[in-house]
Image (cartoon, helix red, strand yellow):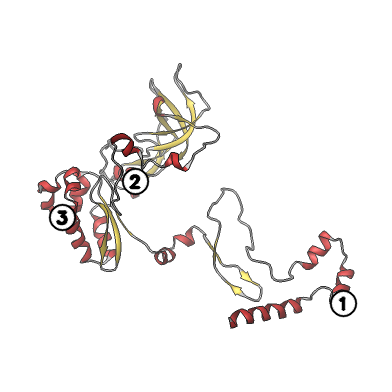
Amino acid sequence: MLAWQSGERGLAALALGEIAVPEPSPGEVLVAVEFAGLNFSDILMLNDKYQVRPPRPFVPGQEIAGVVVKTPPGGRLHVGQRIASKVVSGGFAQYALVRDDMAIPLPDAIPLHVLDADHAFAPQVATGEGPVRVGNRHPETYPCDSFSTRDGDMVVVCLGDPAFHDLARAIGRPDLTEDPRFATNAARNAHETELRATIGGWCAARSRQSAIEELRQAGVPSAPVWAIGDLLKSGDVESRALLKRPEQRDAGSSAFVTQPVKFSGAEEPAGLRAPALGEHTERVLASLLGLDAGLIASLRTGKAIATPEDHKRIDRRVSSKADSK
């Protein structure tokens, strides 16, 4: 089967190749993978920053959905059943092993109320204490926060001690890892104010781009906080074909945002422009009223319907009135 394997550290080092199809052990099923999610934890694992570090080479991918193709006798799942599951690794392949007790059978439809998906009330149910507002930072892990640079904001994410050690070295403060105030995640949370001041001072002395480049070179996840203008300049909008610039008759071209949902195998509608005034008059009269070309021509001659030249004059008058306002 084909699978993406990690033989060296980093996402760019993934290599596509043939490996043997795994055989399920008792309590496991073999799934033909149809969908696999790329999550932040996958990036951490590929960079040796996740708490689980499989020996290389390994197949990453911790979230899959697919169809059961092999199951031991007596299991709760059956061949042909659609499931989704969390896996430790192995999802970026044509087939993956899934623990029987971790697999979630997929129904034909998933009814979901917005309240059902909001777990913000869970801590209060468990402890009697409601959640507090924490701004841009993570409520339980630090530093996972936004910081200001000379020319814009950026986000730095450190999950766990190894990532924090990389950050400390990157900003020239390896001594932070020996400071009892920052030695553990719980300690860093308790002393957020002091740690934020140190990281913020380093960021404030640099441009956003240079700060991000330095941190990424050290393996620290970081990214810019974009305004809409940054997004439009990024190239991502064009790569997703989210903007169309159709030519409008007598009005040139103008950009607009298309429908963001794309269906594989479906062609996008051509043209995508508003019809000009009177553009489809003859087609409508012929197709809906059954008028022939001679009668339509006589109606135009008798001024019962407008000619294309009449429509152009109307368009110019409407545009002139709009401009004067």
Q: Which mark is residue 240?
A: none
Q: Kindly identify the amino acid type of the residue bearing the numbered disc 1.
A: Gly
In percent of width and height, residue 44 lies at: 29, 45
In percent of width and height, residue 150 lies at: 25, 68
Residue drawn 18% across the image and 49% down it: 165
Secondary element type, mark 1: loop
Residue drawn 30% across the image and 48% down it: 10
Sequence-first disc among 1 and 2 = 2
Secondary element type, mark 2: helix
Quadrant in which the C terminus appears: bottom right
Sequence-first disc among 3 and 1 = 3
Q: Which mark is residue 40?
A: 2
Residue 23 in sight in this render: no
In percent of width and height, residue 233 lies at: 42, 66
Quadrant in which the N terminus appears: top left
Residue drawn 12% across the image and 51% down it: 176
Of residues 56 and 193, the one nearer the viewer is: 193
For disc 1, the marked residue is 302
For disc 3, the marked residue is 194
Sequence-first disc among 3 and 2 = 2
